[in-house]
């Protein structure tokens, strides 16, 4: 059951193996820490953190690829340089909040995709700030 | 009993909560009229501000307004309780950081206590918490402040109705309190039910100010201590405390309306079995066991047949074992079944709950103890598998036969915040 328990905790990686041969206690027992919990290390504001999935290559130069898992913290105030999620024209968009000639715009990190200027749009909402992207190599 | 002027109580609630949750996680719904339907897609239970502006009424049966909604291009959604529950959990946890005590009153409202700063002005606090909640989860809240719960509720209403209030109203810090109390009709006061309201109207008491100033003896004679307490709260005394630690649940209920009325015993049994499996799982997740298992079924409130029955079984040893509970529920379903009636709703209740951690089995011999342990391991394994591979990876055969009665949820949005398979996609 124990190995099953740890398989369940998807984000937990056991640091030490607690199966011990009968007789002597492991000398490491006293040093056994809890598991590494990625939620704890990656997410500082759990109540304002949301997960999204990227489709497409518009942020490839920022290292964000198709199918990557994106962790977004809505509590953060976006500043220039941040990668942000915006709601534009009924869709979620991922871009880098950038500044040029004292004007904010959303920059695509891929030359084949257009940047986005706030000028011609009334209804744009910066929805949250991207704090991590998780890419699978499998 | 007169409260020290430093303590305030606020009633904080989310505006258009269900619709806001949906609009916040689906860019397509932003700034669009959205309505949410009740369980079984029956009638409208929530509207976005845009839908309100179209004069779509709460409680309207969906079938009556379907065409109109279509014409007006209103987005129609089934209620998505995994989304609303998750957003509620986020909201309440955020609120905890900004008040002294919190009593979660419903999925989208909470009473909180907060002490006043030196200048007694709580508007900066309220403004801060309001913008913070919006920034963190995209939900707009209304903050009503008063000396007690009844007046906080009234303040919250005023905050919603007064244009210049910006979602915040402090009833304890207003100069013309009488004018504001006059705007609240008696039937809108927290704790005044329909009967009480009718009685008050017949006595010529129309609004909160008149109730506050009504003859005390007359209130006590008719409404007893409850009425007196209500009047005292209207006057600014504190009678009802913040209930921080709601008593642990006394029962667990799982019940659903049927999509189409049920007349066959097999269908009723199947529905109850499915509810029982869910209820047992809920109990185990909270380390609870039940020693009184109850099932009930009833006909529609709107039908001329008015039939309702329940049956229960008391157990010597409390249990959380799905197999034992299923056996009992299947037997009980025969007791409440009646072929002459069309059932519109059925459910199971797990009552007399005890904490399984401290449980004593009354008569235990070695064999039954072994069996108990075996069943506990089996249940735990099933729960873990279902958690790992999403709901109902493993379940009981009775749930798998065709169902003719399931609830209509034709317009359900995704579990965008709680299920990795359903998280929103960024397309550009």
Image (cartoon, rainbow, N blue to C red):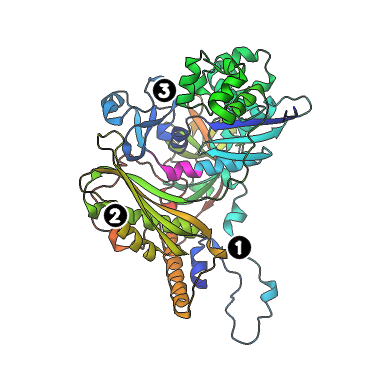
Q: Secondary structure at mark 2?
A: helix
Depth check, mark 3 against mark 2: the one in front is 2
Residue sitting nearer the eye, A21 or A71: A21
The residue identified by callout 2 is B335
Give the residue at mark 3: B52
Left or right, B137 with respect to B80, comes to right
Residue A131 among magenta residues: no
**Image quadrant of residue B166?**
top right
Magenta residues, as a range? B79-86
Front-most of B149 and B24? B149
In which quarter of the view is residue B131 placed? Answer: top right
Chain holding disc 3:
B
The label number, if any, that marks residue B229 in the structure image: none
Of callouts 3 and 2, which one flags the residue occurring earlier in the amino acid sequence?
Answer: 3
- Of all residues, the one furthest to the right in this rendering is B118
Alpha-carbon span between mark 3 and mark 2: 46 Å
Q: Is residue B257 visible?
A: yes
For mark 2, does the 10 Å Cα neighbourhood hold few (<14), some (14 to 19), or many (20 or more) residues? some
Position of residue B418 in the picture relative to residue B237 (left or right): left
Residue shown at 77% from the left, 24% from the top: B119
The answer to whether residue B300 is above or below residue B157 is below
Q: How far is mark 1 from mark 2, CA to CA?
A: 52 Å
Camera-side residue of A51 and A20:
A20
* Mark 3 in CB contact with mark 2 (< 8 angstroms): no
């Amino acid at each position: 059951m124990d190995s099953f328990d740890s398989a369940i905790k998807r984000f937990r990686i056991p640091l030490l193996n607690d199966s011990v041969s009968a007789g002597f206690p492991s000398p490491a027992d006293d040093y056994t820490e809890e598991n590494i919990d990625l939620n704890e290390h990656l997410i500082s504001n759990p109540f304002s953190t949301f997960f999204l999935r990227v489709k497409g290559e518009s942020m490839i130069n920022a290292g964000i690829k198709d199918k990557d898992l994106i962790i977004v913290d809505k509590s953060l105030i976006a500043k220039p340089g941040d990668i942000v999620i915006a709601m534009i024209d009924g869709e979620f968009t991922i871009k880098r909040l950038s500044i040029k000639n004292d004007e904010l715009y959303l920059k695509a990190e891929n030359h084949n995709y257009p940047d986005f200027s706030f000028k011609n749009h009334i209804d744009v909402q910066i929805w949250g700030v991207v704090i991590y992207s998780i890419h699978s190599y499998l | 009993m007169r409260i020290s002027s430093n303590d305030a109580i606020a009633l904080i609630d989310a505006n258009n909560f269900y619709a806001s949750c949906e609009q916040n996680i689906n860019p397509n719904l932003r700034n669009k009229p959205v309505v949410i339907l009740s369980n079984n897609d029956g009638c409208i239970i929530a509207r976005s501000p845009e839908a309100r502006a179209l004069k779509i009424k709460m409680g309207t049966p969906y079938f009556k307004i379907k065409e109109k909604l279509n014409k007006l291009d209103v987005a129609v959604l089934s209620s998505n309780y995994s989304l609303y529950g998750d957003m509620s959990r986020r909201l309440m946890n955020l609120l905890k950081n900004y008040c002294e005590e919190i009593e979660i009153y419903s999925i989208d409202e909470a009473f909180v206590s907060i002490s006043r700063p030196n200048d007694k002005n709580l508007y900066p606090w309220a403004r801060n918490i309001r913008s913070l909640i919006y920034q963190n989860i995209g939900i707009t809240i209304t903050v009503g402040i008063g000396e007690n719960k009844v007046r906080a509720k009234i303040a919250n209403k005023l905050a919603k109705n007064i244009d210049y209030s910006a979602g915040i109203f402090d009833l304890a810090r207003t100069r013309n309190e009488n004018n504001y109390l006059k705007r609240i009709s008696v039937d809108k006061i927290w704790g005044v039910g329909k009967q009480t309201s009718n009685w008050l109207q017949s006595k010529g008491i129309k609004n909160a100010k008149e109730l506050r100033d009504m003859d005390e003896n007359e209130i006590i004679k008719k409404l007893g201590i409850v009425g007196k307490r209500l009047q005292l709260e209207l006057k600014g005394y504190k009678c009802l405390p913040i209930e921080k630690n709601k008593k642990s649940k006394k029962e667990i209920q799982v019940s659903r309306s049927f999509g189409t009325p049920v007349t066959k015993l097999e269908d009723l049994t199947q529905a109850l079995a499915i509810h029982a499996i869910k209820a047992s799982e809920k109990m185990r997740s909270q380390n609870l066991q039940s020693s009184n298992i109850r099932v009930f079924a009833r006909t529609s409130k709107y039908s001329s047949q008015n039939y309702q029955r329940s049956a229960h079984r008391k157990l010597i040893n409390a249990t959380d074992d799905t197999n034992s509970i299923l056996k009992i529920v299947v037997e009980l379903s025969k007791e409440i079944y009646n072929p002459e009636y069309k059932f519109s709703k059925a459910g199971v209740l797990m009552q007399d709950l005890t904490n399984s951690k401290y449980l004593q089995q009354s008569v235990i011999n070695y064999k039954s103890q072994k069996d108990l342990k075996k069943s506990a391991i089996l249940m735990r394994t099933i729960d873990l598998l279902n958690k790992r591979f999403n709901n109902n990876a493993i379940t009981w055969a009775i749930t798998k036969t065709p169902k003719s009665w399931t609830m209509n949820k034709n317009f359900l949005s995704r579990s965008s915040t709680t299920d990795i398979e359903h998280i929103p996609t960024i397309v550009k």
